[in-house]
Amino acid sequence: MKARPRSDLLLNFPICYHLHMKKEERLFKKLVERATNILILTHRGPDIDAFSSALLLKISLEEIYPKKKFALQAKQGPTIKLPRMKDVEIVDRLDSTGFNLIIVTDAGDMSLCASDADNISNDIQKIYIDHHDTFFNYVQGEVLINNNMSSAAEQVHELLRNVYGKRFKLDEDKAELVQYGIVSDTGRFLYDITTPNTHRVFADAKEITAIDLEDFAYRNSKFPREATTAVIKYLESLTIEKDMAYMYISREDLENNEELNKGASMARIFLKDKYLRFIQGVHWGFIIKPDMNTDNIWTASFRSTKGYQDVKLITEELGGGGHIYAAGVRIEANSLDEMLEKILKVCREHLEK
């Protein structure tokens, strides 16, 4: 993906994105109504909330605007079965050719979605629907809708309800997507990002159809069989310093092993959420993975236990962001050693505090 210059083709909106919500909602509606072909994207390594929010948005807008064309592209599918997954076009390369509006869910910047290998035009209007407490530098004409809700699914639900009123109707598929998105990103309502409104939105969806939370917890605790080799490789690198743990996988490992490369993203998702903080004496940490589509770019996913490290502060120092106990960053580095050095320098400063 090329750098994003300003373009005369973009609407001349001021670069100010924490507007009053009503203004953002009007702008969202105006842009959607003006567009004819709309591409929906979400972040790399999409989790359950990413897919739930993107699918909720797509199928809802298709019902409201039956004459418009909508597409949802992703490079991999979810780790569990979700309603309407047939609506997701699994691609090797994101491509905005033929579209005149892009809407991104669960991310606040295109750099979190696309790489240099993708074909995403700089001249297409973009709307970001996010819930992470992260600030990016936007080019003119881009729009951010973010009320720091529990999940992108809750944010999309509230946006559609506020903009379209009775035209936005929950059916069983959409109700399940709302519930899956919320329970996954709130840790089944355990995290501080859960609010009274989160419970109200979930309850409204549950009135229509109830997902099986016990079954969800069971299925969500598994990882795909094809990720097994990558999980083992990550664990070989496990390092513990005081109450911090970290793991990594090298670019050379992924370049030389197709099976490893295929399962690396899924393994990272599993380990950061289901393993990293559950080692005796460990309360926080991070996992590093190279971006195989962009040379010298690495991603680090951070997780922390409530009452311990504020990983959002750490990732913000490194140029990323997220939530207090779940955050991430993309860093340019010539090698794994350089990447580790950059991250550990900041982490060790916080270890001493």
Image: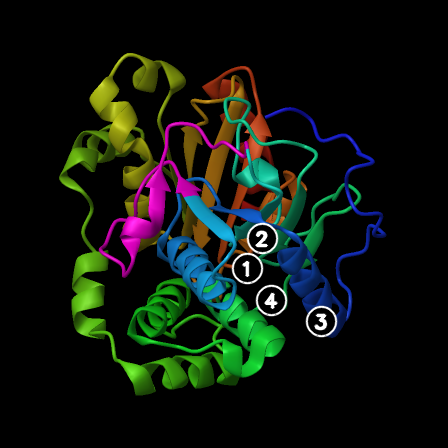
- Badge 4 element: loop
Mark before the other along the chain sequence, 3 or 4? 3
In space, the residues marked 3 and 2 are separated at their CA atoms by: 24 Å
Q: Mark 3 vs mark 1: which is more N-terminal?
A: 3
**Residue span colored magenta:** 73-97
Q: Is residue 18 above or below residue 244?
A: below
Can residue 256 be seen in the rendering of this structure?
Answer: yes
Q: Distance between the residues labelled 4 and 1?
A: 12 Å
- Please report whichever mark, 4 or 1, sits nearer to the chain's N-terminal start: 4
Percent position of residue 165, x then y: 56, 81
The numbered disc on residue 312 is 2
Left or right: where does residue 65 sit relative to residue 274?
right
> Which of marks 2 and 1 precedes in the sequence?
2
Q: With respect to residue 228, does 181 lie above or below? A: below
Give the residue drawn at x 35%, y 26%. Answer: 249
Can you identify the residue that label 3 sits on? 21
